[in-house]
Image (cartoon, rainbow, N blue to C red):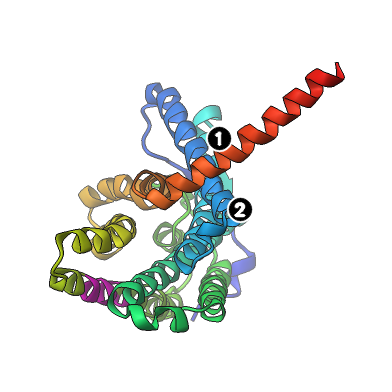
Amino acid sequence: MLNREKGNETGITQFILLGLGNHTELWPFLFLLFLVIYLVTITGNLLIIVLVADDQHLHTPMYFFLGNLSCLETFYSSTILPKMLSNLLTGDRTITVSGCLSQYYFFGCCVAIETFLLAAMSYDRYLAICRPLFYASVMNRKLCFQLIAGAWLNGLMANSIVVFLIAQFSFCGPNVIDHYFCDLSPLEKLSCSDPSLLKIIVFLLTFIYTLAPFFLTISSYVCIITSIIRIQSTIGRQKAFSTCSSHLMVVCLFYGTIIIVYMLPDTPTLRQLNKIFSVFYTILTPLANPLIYTLRNKEVHQALRRVHGKLTHFFGRGCLKTFLIL
């Protein structure tokens, strides 16, 4: 059982995040790099949210899920990057215990929600390509809202249990986290409490909230690729694949790096590489989402042109009115 009595006697009030390394001469470059990534990530994802909400042509299940994914990626990147930027700018790499637990809570919630969202999006593409006659009746507005609500509520609830258990731990030193954000494994290693119950709970939740959505996503794409191969027309195959290729790229980037980080053995050599691989699913995946979907999607391009036309017309008329008043 967890040592609840020591939970209130911890001598540790803050942790030290080692970040990506001690090469201080690289910190200004890393700060500028990650600042640009953060600004592009926030701008790109907010743009997708605005387009999906504003353009009637994008009021479909696929873009409803995409808008929610962009909303999630905005929270996701804001959970890790602001603190990382602050550490690089000021050189102060400390974080309070409560701040560390809060960061891990929101990070864990975002990961859990994203696994369900990616599974829902893969199911949507499966119905659209493999069961097109049933798509409109099955993927209706009610089911879409149920899938989204289930993803967000389950993700928030699951990580609440984990963080509640971690909060009962006592941290009696050392207080150095060899990472650039607060993750479960470093927190568990720094604790001097018995983590047996936590490990059992995490194992069960990992199966439910990660492996199950992963296998659902993979099985959906196996069916999708099989159906695409059977299409006789080359144009038809290209059109069918173009509707799911962007999502498949995001899935491969997200799950591929998570599997490398959390399922390979924890050795000193891999530990350093894991920090690099962690950058992919914590920082680059939220960045890749708007880039992949906007650069490869004709409907998003058309929506951008329509919004641009509306803005040009609006500001053009506004400038003309101001000119006439003057």
Q: Is residue 220 magenta?
A: yes
Report the magenta stretch's main SS: helix
Q: Count residues near mark 2 (Cα–Cα under 10 Å), then give few for <14, some for 14-19, many for 20+.
A: few
Number of labels in the image equals: 2
- Is residue 51 rendered to the left or right of residue 219? right
Regarding residue 83, the answer to whether it shows in the image is: no
Numbered disc 2: secondary structure: helix
Q: Nearer the viewer, mark 1 or mark 2?
A: 2
Regarding residue 246, the answer to whether it shows in the image is: yes
Q: Nearer the viewer, residue 68 or 204?
A: 68
Residue 292 against residue 255 in the figure, above or below = above
How far across and down, in percent of the image, does residue 105 sit?
55, 62
Q: Which mark, by number, is residue 187?
A: none
Numbered disc 1: secondary structure: helix
Which residue is identified by label 1? 86
Name the residue: 38% across, 83% down.
Answer: 134
Question: What amino acid is at disc 2?
Answer: Asp
How far across and down, in percent of the image, does residue 168 sit?
58, 71
Q: Which mark, by number, is residue 54?
A: 2
Instruction: Name the image quarter holding residue 8.
Output: bottom right
Magenta-tinted stretch: 215-224
Q: Earlier in the sequence, mark 1 or mark 2?
A: 2
Name the residue: 34% across, 59% down.
Answer: 247
- Is residue 223 rendered to the left or right of residue 79? left
Instruction: Name the image quarter holding residue 216.
Output: bottom left
How far across and down, in percent of the image, does residue 203 sit?
37, 77
Q: Nearer the viewer, residue 115 or 68?
A: 68
Name the residue: 51% across, 50% down.
Answer: 48
Q: Count residues near mark 1 (Cα–Cα under 10 Å), then give few for <14, some for 14-19, many for 20+.
A: few
Q: Nearer the viewer, residue 209 or 133?
A: 133
Going by the picture, which residue comes out furthest to the right? 325
Question: What amino acid is at disc 1?
Answer: Ser
